[in-house]
Image (cartoon, grey):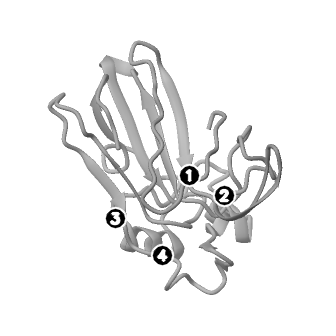
Amino acid sequence: MPGGGKQLNPSDTWSILVNSTQRANGRIWARTRCNVTGPNGLKCETGDCGGLLECTANGSPPNTLVEYALNQFNNMDFFDISLLNGFNVPVSFAAKSNKGCNVKISCSSDLNVQCPKELRVPGGCNDPCTVFKTDEYCCSSGSCNPTAYSRYFKLGCPQAVSFLGQDGPQSTDLCPTGTDYA
């Protein structure tokens, strides 16, 4: 997001080229167990984009997100892995250029295996806001604390953002603008 979609089989890659002189923001997530329904039609069990192959909005939970903001303040790139929309597949995001940055973040655990039964859905582990729709889990008031569910996500994937009140250096990584990522 914004706009994209491509089928990847195991071990496939997809290069996303971003002009390093312009600011860019985006989100990347996997969709699973998809069926083609037309020329731009794709219905997926997790991360679905309203039935479209090329997303025009965020995917529906659950989906493990990689979020990035490139060429930002002080010529830095910011990125994180977020479990705020739940979990569907393990992901990683790593600097791979010689810009002096060797950051690698990952969520390599399969959180679907031990997902609390009240969050479990076919193909994934929902976030508690989607399931319960209360301020405790959705942080509508702007002030929230970790919950048993966010602690479950954090324990399985310590480098990922697991609740809305989590800000600061422990939840966002950065590299110099112009860094390449995998």
- Identified at 64% across, 38% down, the residue is 4
Disc with the residue nearer the chain's start (1 vs 2):
1
Residue closer to the observer: 139 or 119 = 119
| Residue that badge 1 annotates | 29
Dot 1 falls on a residue whose secondary structure is strand
Disc assigned to residue 47: 2
Q: Position of residue 106 (x, y in %)?
A: 34, 58
Amino acid identity at mark 4: Leu
Q: Position of residue 128 (x, y in %)?
A: 63, 69
Dot 2 falls on a residue whose secondary structure is loop
- Identified at 74% across, 50% down, the residue is 49
Disc with the residue nearer the chain's start (2 vs 3):
2
* Label 3 neighbour load within 10 Å: few <14, some 14-19, many 20+: some
Q: CA distance from mark 3 to mark 4?
A: 12 Å
Q: Is residue 8 above or below residue 103?
A: below
Disc with the residue nearer the chain's start (1 vs 3):
1
Do labels 3 and 4 touch, CB within 8 Å?
no
| Residue that badge 4 annotates | 111
Amino acid identity at mark 1: Trp
Q: CA distance from mark 2 to mark 3?
A: 22 Å
Q: Which quadrant does the N terminus fall into? A: top right
* Label 2 neighbour load within 10 Å: few <14, some 14-19, many 20+: many
Q: Is residue 165 above or below residue 90?
A: above
